[in-house]
Amino acid sequence: MRLVHPWPPLYDQASKVLILGTFPSPKSRQMGFPYGHPQNIFWRTLATLLGQPPPARQVATVKQFALDNGIALWDVLHACDIDGAADASIKKPEANLFAPILAETNITAIFTTGKTATNLFNKLCAAEAGMTATYLPSTSPANRVTQMKVSFLEQWRLVAKALQKGQMPVRL
């Protein structure tokens, strides 16, 4: 089924990093915010890395949490054919545009959650954005085995490091 992304990017001028999923899951679309599935550990992972309590799972609260911490959020795809939440089922991907966001912010790093998001961004969006994306393991409930590994949090620590250091962008 062809779906179009349901919401605009979340960012402000103070955003330092951009975190992208592939496309919102049915549960996230129902909840009205990124990583909205109750079993998705995205918000808990970020809170742990930032030394803060996780935000309440409400639209306004999670958005404010992201912005207060210099984090911009969106997804790689504007539209696609997808079955449920399975990235492996994606067909006819249509990418979002990122150069306008990058021009209005202080974003110095782009992170993608999951291999599909990383591959699609670097294939479809990197040239337009002028930056490549760094892979992070997915926080989806479907990725529980990877999340149990020590390397999961180590890879996610790259977000906290980028926020603290204001690292230089990886430009093409």
Image (tube, grey):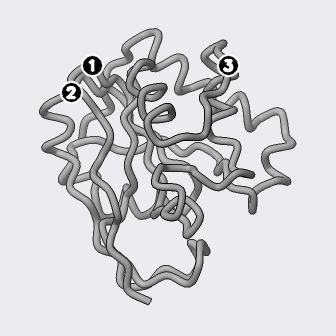
* Mark seen at residue 14: 1
Q: Are marks 3 and 2 in contact (CB under 8 Å)?
A: no
Foreground residue, 77 or 47? 47
Check disc 2 and report the residue beneath it.
105
Give percent across and percent down for residue 56: 61, 32
Give percent across and percent down for residue 85: 59, 72
In what quadrant of the picture does the N terminus appear?
bottom left
Residue type marked 3: Pro
Q: Are marks 2 and 1 in contact (CB under 8 Å)?
A: yes
Name the side, left or right, on which 73 lies relative to 41.
Answer: left
* Residue at 29% in and 34% down: 11
User: Is label 2 in a helix, a strand or a loop?
Assistant: loop
Give percent across and percent down for residue 26: 55, 70
Label 1 environment density (alpha carbons within 10 Å; few <14, some 14–19, many ≥20)? some
Residue type marked 2: Thr
* Residue at 47% in and 42% down: 59
Label 2 environment density (alpha carbons within 10 Å; few <14, some 14–19, many ≥20)? some
Where 51 falls versus 127 (above or below)?
above
